[in-house]
Image: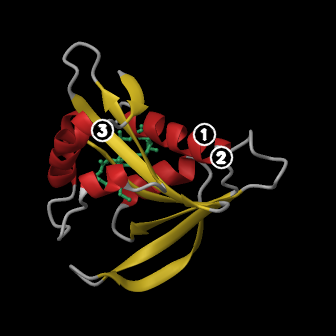
Amino acid sequence: MIIRKMEEKDIEEVSSIDRICFPNVKPPINYRAEFENKIATYFVAEETDSSSLVAFGGYWRFYDEADIITIATLPDYRRQHIASSILRHLLDNSIASGATYITLEVRASNIPAQKLYEKFGFQVDGIRKKYYIDNQEDAVLMSIKLEQNDTNNA
Ligand SMILES: CC(C)(COP(=O)(O)OP(=O)(O)OC[C@H]1O[C@@H](n2cnc3c(N)ncnc32)[C@H](O)[C@@H]1OP(=O)(O)O)[C@@H](O)C(=O)NCCC(=O)NCCS
């Protein structure tokens, strides 16, 4: 498995993984717009043999803050630490580009994702009530705050 930055040729495959992993999110994220968005950075996981993509994730950065926008692994490839590898790249890349405060929102019911984020040191900051418009679900707000001299330890 190779983890690399998303390229223009990946837009269709990333969109298809997104539809499989987030079937109820409407409208879906427009990955062409994301690819062209100057504050966005996306990584993909590509199978070495087939060159197929099996996972991806991305973040936006503004000033010293990075916001994890999404992360997803195809169902057949889960629990193989692929999302962990992507998240490691997102964190390292955002920190290298100057982020010291990394945030995200996750559905209250999404325990797998919360466990993944906890493993990387994200802590719960609070709950945003009825944040998701599709089912009125609460969002759990999580973040990592790095000290200025602590950027290697996240
Ligand atoms: C959440 C998701 C990205 C995890 O992807 P993954 O590639 O399976 O994750 P990893 O294998 O790297 O898991 C890392 C850790 O996360 C936790 N975790 C992952 N899936 C879990 C599950 N189903 N139940 C409990 N913990 C889980 C575990 O701590 C795991 O470490 P371990 O396997 O050593 O116990 C994947 O389940 C997914 O794509 N879900 C649908 C999309 C989604 O909800 N994305 C998150 C949006 S905020």
Figure quadrant of the N terminus: top left
- Secondary structure type for disc 2: helix
Proximity of marks 2 and 1: CB atoms separated by less than 8 Å:
yes
In which quarter of the view is residue 61 placed? Answer: bottom right
In the image, taking residue 116 as reference, residue 125 lies left or right, namely: right
> Which residue corresponds to the image point at 19% horizontal and 35% vertical from the top-left?
76
> Which residue corresponds to the image point at 80% horizontal and 55% vertical from the top-left?
147
Q: Amino acid at mark 1?
A: Asp
Estimate the spatial distance between the alpha carbons at disc 2 and disc 1, rounded to whole Å: 5 Å
Q: Toward the viewer: 84 or 152?
A: 152
Figure quadrant of the C terminus: top right
Which residue matches tag 2? 95
**First reached walking from the N terminus: tag 3 or tag 1:** 3
In which quarter of the view is residue 138 placed? Answer: bottom left
- In the current view of this chain or complex, which residue is farthest to the right? 149
- Secondary structure type for disc 1: helix
Of badges 3 and 2, nearer the viewer stands 2
Which residue matches tag 3? 55
Mark carried by residue 24:
none
> Which residue corresponds to the image point at 49% horizontal and 56% vertical from the top-left?
39
Q: Amino acid at mark 3?
A: Ala
In the image, taking residue 135 as reference, residue 140 lies left or right, namely: right
Residue 74 visible to the viewer: no
Q: Amino acid at mark 2?
A: Ile
For label 2, count other residues whose C-alpha is less than 10 Å away and answer few (under 14), some (14-19) or many (20+): many
In this rendering, the answer to whether 30 lies above or below 141 is: above
Give the x, y percent position of residue 63: 65, 62
Give the x, y percent position of residue 104: 49, 64
Q: Is mark 3 within 8 Å of ligand 1?
A: yes
Which residue matches tag 1? 92
For label 3, count other residues whose C-alpha is less than 10 Å away and answer few (under 14), some (14-19) or many (20+): many
